[in-house]
């Protein structure tokens, strides 16, 4: 005998449960990010893939930083060294030290660290290739001294194996600190704002889809006809069928009018809700994201002001940022050049030199040079008169 008796209630069945799946952007990893000490390399790559402006900013930094060479006291050795830097294989059908540094710096900015490998030739008298490694497969371990580190290979079963020939491996951290001695990504402060920006874009797309694919609500009021439930249901089904035929004819390119008797009201679902203006919040978030990269917005195609141009202050700040990146990469180039010279049997000193960074307006530089020459001429004339 049941403890509780259920009374049967006659009437219409209950309505469907009003539950549905929410539309989300495809980059779920950004929404589920929880700040931890372990870097999320896949998260940083998702940010670059989801936000083109961030990806373009990193590519701009990589390309503006390039341009390296080396000079020696012995001109013959210098020519051989420059030829090596120009033709050394860098993997993936790339050659030249610049191709290696572009990939190396791209990984350094994105993941906060970069690893590479120097591959010696079979005869041991040269370098066969310089390759970039996948930081996701490498674990950094502390050695016996604070000045030394060991690179270990992370296997699929969770174990690690210290790689041999540590002298042939390259490792560079980006902006290391006592809390993060192995580097911090340039994108480490972007996941939260990136998630908000993607939600705005997803909502914007859903609103425009609603505006481009209209939904109609057809309401029939029988009025004083006094139709019973069966006839009312039949008439409602007939109206729905005729309305569906009219909409299908419209999609096919023909026009079919919808004619009905009685009080019929047709409304567009969601017509009262206008598409919100997202320009202000999107710009506010993009300003925060771009400020992390240090690149002026107009260089990324964001013309927020009609008078934007590269000022001398912006050029100086940008030059200092690129110089700092070059200081980070210089030890890597020096290690490669030093090893090549030793393997070739050369003992001459060398210097790594970078191309001059020129971000100023050529016209303004020429005018400034003219003023300096005129000032020097006036000073020389004054000395002669005295």
Image: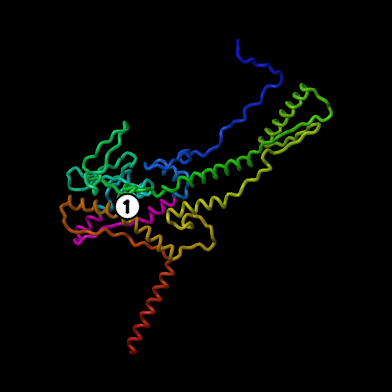
When asked about the image quadrant of residue 166, the answer is top left
User: Coloring scheme of the render?
Assistant: rainbow
State which quarter of the image contains the N terminus. top right
Q: Which residues are magenta?
A: 56-82
Residue 357 in view here: yes
Q: Nearer the viewer, residue 292 or 67?
A: 292
Q: Secondary structure at mark 1?
A: helix
Residue 241: x %, y % from top left: 71, 28
Residue 332: x %, y % from top left: 27, 51
Seen in the picture, residue 311 relative to 152 is either above or below; the reply is below
Q: Nearer the viewer, residue 257 or 310?
A: 310
Residue 124: x %, y % from top left: 17, 45
Please tell me how crowded label 1 is: few (under 14), some (14-19), or many (20+) other residues with Cα within 10 Å: many
* Residue annotated with mark 1: 98
State which quarter of the image contains the C terminus. bottom left
| Main secondary structure type of the part rendered in magenta | helix
Seen at 43% across and 69% down, the residue is 363
When asked about the image quadrant of residue 232, the answer is top right
Q: Is residue 385 magenta?
A: no
Seen in the picture, residue 190 relative to 71 is either above or below; the reply is above
Instruction: Report whether 278 appears left or right of 61.
Output: right
What residue occupies the far right of the structure in this picture?
A: 224
Q: Is residue 68 magenta?
A: yes
Residue 255: x %, y % from top left: 72, 37
| Count of marks placed on residues | 1
What residue occupies the far bottom of the structure in this picture?
A: 386
Residue 99 in view here: no
Instruction: Report whether 157 appears left or right of 365.
Output: left
């Amino acid at each position: 005998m049941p403890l509780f008796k259920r009374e049967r209630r006659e009437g219409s069945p209950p309505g469907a449960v009003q539950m549905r799946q929410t539309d989300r952007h495809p980059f779920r990893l950004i929404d589920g990010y929880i700040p931890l000490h372990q870097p999320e390399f896949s998260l940083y790559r998702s940010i670059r893939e989801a936000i083109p402006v961030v990806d373009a900013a990193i590519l701009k930094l990589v390309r503006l930083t390039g341009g390296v060479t080396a000079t020696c006291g012995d001109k013959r050795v210098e020519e051989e060294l420059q030829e090596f830097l120009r033709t050394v294989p860098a993997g993936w059908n790339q050659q030249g030290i610049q191709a290696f540094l572009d990939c190396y710096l791209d990984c350094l900015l994105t993941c906060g660290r970069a690893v590479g490998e120097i591959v010696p030739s079979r005869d041991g008298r040269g370098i066969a290739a310089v390759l970039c490694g996948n930081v996701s497969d490498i674990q950094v371990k502390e050695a016996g001294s604070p000045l030394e580190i060991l690179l270990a290979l992370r296997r699929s079963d969770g174990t690690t194996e210290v790689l041999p020939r540590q002298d042939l491996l390259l490792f560079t951290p980006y902006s290391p600190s006592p809390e993060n001695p192995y580097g911090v990504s340039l994108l480490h402060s972007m996941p939260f704002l990136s998630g908000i920006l993607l939600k705005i874009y997803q909502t914007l797309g859903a609103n425009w889809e609603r505006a481009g694919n209209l939904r109609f609500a057809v309401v029939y009021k029988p009025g004083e006809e006094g139709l019973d439930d069966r006839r009312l249901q039949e008439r409602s089904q007939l109206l729905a069928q005729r309305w569906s035929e009219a909409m299908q004819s419209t999609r096919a390119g023909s026009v079919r009018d919808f004619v009905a008797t009685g009080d019929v009201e047709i409304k567009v679902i969601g017509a009262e809700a206008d598409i919100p203006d997202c320009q202000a919040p999107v710009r506010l978030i993009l300003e925060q994201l771009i400020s992390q990269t240090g690149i002026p917005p107009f260089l990324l195609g964001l013309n927020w002001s009609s008078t934007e141009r590269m000022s001398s202050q912006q050029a100086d700040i940008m030059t200092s940022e690129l110089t700092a990146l070059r200081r980070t990469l210089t030890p890597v180039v020096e290690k490669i050049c030093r090893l090549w010279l030793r393997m070739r049997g050369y003992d001459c000193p060398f210097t790594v030199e970078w191309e001059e960074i020129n971000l100023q307006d050529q016209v303004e530089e020429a005018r400034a040079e003219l003023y300096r020459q005129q000032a020097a001429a006036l000073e020389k004339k004054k000395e002669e008169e005295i």
